[in-house]
Image (cartoon, grey):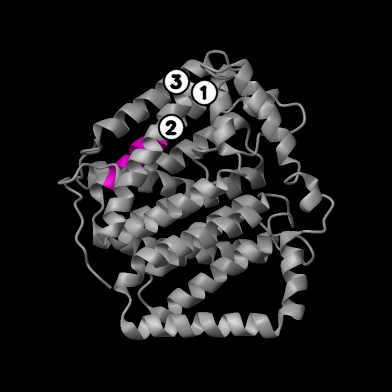
Amino acid sequence: MLSGVLSVWLVGQFLTQFLIRKYGFEWIRLIAAMGVALLWPVGYFVLSGIHFFPRRPTTVCLFGVLGFITFAATSSVVSPNSGMSFLYVMLTGVSFFVAMQFSSALREREWQRGFAFYSVLGVAVLLMFTAFDYRPGTRLGNGTGILNPNSVGFVAVSVTVCSLMVRTRVVAICTFCCGMGVIFLTGSRSAFLGALIALFIATFFLRKNLGKKSLIGTLIGVFIMAALCAIYWSEIWPHITSFLALDSSYRGIGSGATGRVIAWAATWDLFKAHPWFGVGYRAHGELLKMASSGHNGYLATLAEVGILGFLSAMVIVFSGLAGLWRRAAAGERSSAVLLALCCGYLIIAMFERFLFNQGNPSSLLFMLGVFWGARRSGAASQCQDLGA
């Protein structure tokens, strides 16, 4: 049951963003809708008798969480829109709380089922969105203009990686291919790069769970794909250049990372002008004159909450990654997938708006992974190595 709650909670974030954008909610209603979408699992925890407060996060991680929330709230005092900043601080705190609840309640089998359910359900929702939005000749997301193509590709990354936990092979292959297809239709290069890195890391750690036949079949498949690419390279290369937009004046090699370099420099200047407490949580975009955001989650965090808040965020992230790495190396399949998702997410965050983002299931999976890795050993959620 908890696996189903997890998968519905994750997919619900994407659906909430779609409805918010489609019907044009004002920002207060937007935050209220996001809060409901984030908080409803708490009701399940209470009614099902599961502990209300998360159990056994490490002291280091707790200090990081408290530090980040404190400095984010402090920065909101000087924000050009203090009310909005405080509400986003509350949303971030809520997302941390619910993610810690899931991470302390789920066990290994439930994680695996939750990943599988989320992947299948997520692909179904993405395919429905594709049928609704896609227009030939445009990036998926630009057809109706409701959602940003990179945001859609970001969702598809986690759906694709989680397909590795689907046990029915035919369903897993279909889910994987659909997820990669959605990424291709969005034209999101950051999502594609993040997906490749995440899949490589997941495959590296999960290789122990592959039988000899599966391993040989995988190697043969890779060899066949490489051979076909070499044979038909002249036909494939135009599609690659089209996807990467190498010759585009707007997105190509000479565009300065689609204008992001200028936004990065401006965001860095904001940080230098307000190094200690920042310009206000979720407020840096209002102070940039040439872009709506800095398009870099790390620089945005620095500019918004200052160096102290940024260091607190890094404490949260790396305390979780260290734990995930140890558990993935010990053979935990769920930790391998979460580590892969976190690493892919950290790559994508170099090009996207925020480091902690509540409106995307991939961002919430990043939080889940960090808090799963940062739990104390011997916690109630101690997992079992189930093998393949």
Which numbered mark, 3 or 2, is in the foreground of this view? 2
Quarter of the C terminus within the rendering: bottom left
Instruction: Identify the residue position indicated by label 3 in the image.
Output: 71
Residue stretch in magenta = 94-103
Secondary structure of residue under mark 2: helix
Secondary structure of residue under mark 3: helix
- On residue 256, the disc is none
* Residue at the spot 40% in from the left edge and 39% down from the top edge: 317
- Residue 56 visible here: yes
Q: Farthest residue to the right: give it.
A: 249
Marks 3 and 2 in Cβ contact (< 8 Å) = no
Q: Marks 3 and 2, Cα distance to the nearest angstrom?
A: 10 Å
In the figure, residue 330 lies in which quadrant? bottom left
Using residue 135 as the reference point, say whether residue 249 is left or right of it: right
- Whether residue 105 is in magenta: the answer is no
Three-letter code for the amino acid on which mark 3 is drawn: Phe
Camera-nearest residue between 342 and 181 = 342
- On residue 313, the disc is 2
- On residue 305, the disc is 1
Three-letter code for the amino acid on which mark 2 is drawn: Ala
- Whether residue 100 is in magenta: the answer is yes
Image location of residue 286, percent across then percent down: 68, 25
Image location of residue 73, percent across then percent down: 46, 20
Quarter of the N terminus within the rendering: bottom left
